[in-house]
Image (cartoon, rainbow, N blue to C red):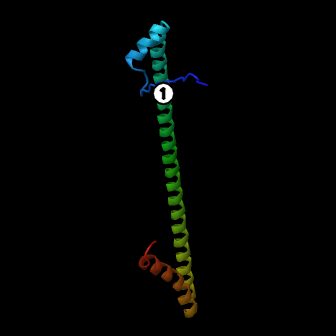
């Protein structure tokens, strides 16, 4: 049996960008009046929304960076305060050790006075001669 053969032709059209090419817009307009204007309006609205979203993203990024700077400043101040407190405590301990050494030396406890002076001497030597990491 001899069947008729059919042929199917598929045509595709591809374009890049926001709007279709002018000839396609003309065909849309010819098919349904006002379509080209509606497409232009839709493109304008989409561009406006995209700009608003971009602006919100930039503002959010700026706010996040400002928060990071604020946190870094707070952290820096806390580290400075902690370091200052440590230095003050070290100074007080050195003064107490020197005072104890003087007191022990006056009361004829030379060995103990030398031991009391060893603490601040060792800490000062370590501070000035050891490399920092």
Instruction: Residue at 49% x, 12% y: name it.
Output: 38
Q: Residues within 10 Å of mark 1 (few under 14, many from 20)?
A: few
Say which of 6 and 21 sits in front: 6
Residue 117: image location, x then y, percent: 52, 85
Residue at the far front: name it. 1
* Vertical order, 82 against 108 (above or below): above
Residue 133 in the figure: left or right of residue 111: left
Identify which residue, 51 or 89, lies in the foreground: 51
In the displayed structure, 82 sits above or below 105; it is above
View extreme (right): residue: 1
Q: In this view of the protein, which residue sits in the foreground, 111 or 22?
A: 22
Q: Which residue lies furthest to the left in this view?
A: 22
User: In the displayed structure, does residue 100 sit left or right of residue 18?
Assistant: right
- Residue 111: x and y in percent read 56, 93
Name the spot of residue 91 as percent of width and height, x first: 51, 72
Q: How many labels does the image show?
A: 1
Whole-percent x, y for residue 25 in the image: 42, 15
Q: Name the residue under label 1.
A: 50
At x 49%, y 42%, the residue is: 66
Q: Is mark 1 on a helix, strand or loop?
A: helix
Quadrant of residue 17 within the rendered picture: top left
Q: In which quarter of the image is the N terminus?
A: top right
65 or 71: which is nearer to us? 65
Asked if residue 128 is positioned above or below residue 60 in the image, the reply reads below
């Amino acid at each position: 049996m001899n069947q008729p053969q059919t042929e199917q032709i598929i045509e595709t059209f591809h374009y890049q960008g926001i709007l279709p090419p002018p000839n396609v817009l003309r065909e849309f307009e010819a098919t349904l009046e006002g379509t080209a204007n509606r497409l232009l309006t839709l493109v304008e609205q989409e561009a406006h929304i995209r700009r608003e979203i971009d602006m919100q993203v930039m503002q959010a990024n700026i706010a996040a960076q400002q928060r990071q700077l604020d946190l870094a400043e707070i952290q820096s101040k806390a580290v400075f305060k902690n370091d200052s407190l440590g230095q003050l405590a070290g100074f007080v301990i050195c003064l107490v050790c020197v005072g104890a050494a003087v007191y022990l030396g006056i009361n004829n406890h030379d060995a103990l006075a030398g031991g009391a002076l060893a603490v601040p001497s060792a800490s000062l030597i370590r501070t000035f001669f050891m490399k920092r990491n």
